Image (cartoon, helix red, strand yellow):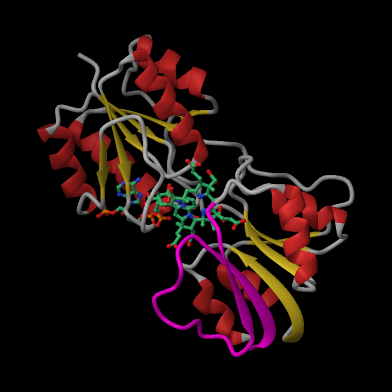
Amino acid sequence: MTRILLLGGTSEASALARALAERGDDAIFSYAGRTGTPVAQPLPTRVGGFGGVAGLVEYLRAEAITHVVDATHPFAAGMSANAIAACDRAEVALAALERPAWRAGKGDDWTRVRDIVGAVAALPDSGARVFLAIGKQHVDAFTAKPGNFYLLRLVDPPETPLPFPDCAIEIARGPFDVASDEALMEAHGITHIVAKNSGGTGAEAKLTAARALALPVVMIDRPATPARRVLNSVGAVLDWLDHGADRGV
Ligand code: 3Y8
Ligand code: NAP
């Protein structure tokens, strides 16, 4: 009997949740609990960490999960690594639903960096007006260059004042659109954009807007994830679920 754990938190996870609900599959949707009021899902939903690999193994066994779909964000490297280890130990089939990385196109002015520290290094030491569209978990690294103005886009209002002398906050949960991202950047006189290479359509608008405004983008490459089965569409996941998912990678 197929029973699915869907590790969510992305547009692709939400699309898969709709497909599974429509088919009446026995599935549970899982959020980390990072945001105040996550978008409701059409599946029974759990919120919060599992308690590391051991906690996830225990959960898989207690809930008699037969398949895990890791549809978390490409930067949710910890969750993805835990899912690989836990599914191996619990002998549960695992597949990742992942969207391809963005690639620079004609008219793009990207500087690719390996990580957040690299993104800070790639910015001017002062005088820049930077759109930090990377959420709130890693903004502290940019306090190394307090002479820049930072526009932060966050899902929830910050609980504590931001550690920047010169900054503005935009509270918004994507998916975003090009016109409003362009207007936002012009309103703040943005000179640089910092983005994670999350791929997908939900966060792409700012790159299209940057191209239109001929603004440079500092693009943070995805962290490496250990080998696992990767599927690139909801359809491919449904096929995998229906045609006997083996545990092979
Ligand atoms: C809690 C669930 C859907 C899912 C929507 C996608 C699209 C909008 C783009 C910008 C970039 C960013 C951020 C972003 C995007 C989608 C998708 C995506 C980027 C929600 C959600 C949760 C989170 C967590 C949140 C992080 C933050 C990252 C904001 C819900 C809305 C910047 C990543 O305040 C915080 O602590 C926010 C934390 C992890 C990255 C960070 O490090 O701060 N996502 N985002 C999930 C959970 O609890 O398990 O609240 O409804 C989901 C979505 N975020 O169904 O339509 O699929 O990519 N999310 C990045 O890509 O750079 C915004 O501003 O341009
Ligand atoms: P992370 O750093 O990889 O994971 C840290 C810990 O959070 C995990 O070890 C796990 O805790 C818990 N966790 C993460 N995702 C979970 C999920 N879907 N269900 C239950 N527990 C989860 O994760 P993150 O980067 O903070 O991302 C958290 C959530 O935001 C994920 O749902 C992700 O898809 C979504 N998201 C992240 C980004 C991003 O830029 N990172 C962007 C968009 C959406 P335990 O070890 O206790 O099990």
Q: Position of residue 51 (x, y in %)?
A: 20, 54
Corner quadrant of residue 128: bottom right
Q: Residue at x 44, y 13 (%)?
A: 239
Q: Nearer the viewer, residue 166 or 2?
A: 166
Residue at the image position 64 percent from the left and 49 percent from the top: 176
Q: Is 202 positioned to the left or the right of 235 in the image?
A: right
Residue pictured at 49% horizontal, 23% vertical = 234
Q: As rendered, which of 180 and 200 lies closer to the eye?
A: 180
Is residue 127 shown left or right of residue 144? Answer: right
Q: Is residue 156 visible?
A: yes
Quarter-of-image position of residue 226: top left
Please tell me whether residue 102 is drawn above or below residue 160 in the rendered image.
above
Total marks placed: 0
Identified at 54% across, 25% down, the residue is: 233
Quadrant in the picture for the N terminus: top left
Asked if residue 152 is positioned above or below residue 80 in the image, the reply reads below
Q: Which residues are magenta?
A: 146-173
Task: Reply yes or no: does residue 239 show up in magenta.
Answer: no
Question: Residue lying farthest left?
Answer: 62
Quarter that holds the C terminus: top left
Which of the 4 quarters of the picture holds residue 3?
top left
Whether residue 123 appears in this view of the structure is: no
Q: Is residue 157 magenta?
A: yes
Q: Position of residue 59 (x, y in %)?
A: 16, 39
165 over 218 or under it: above or below: below
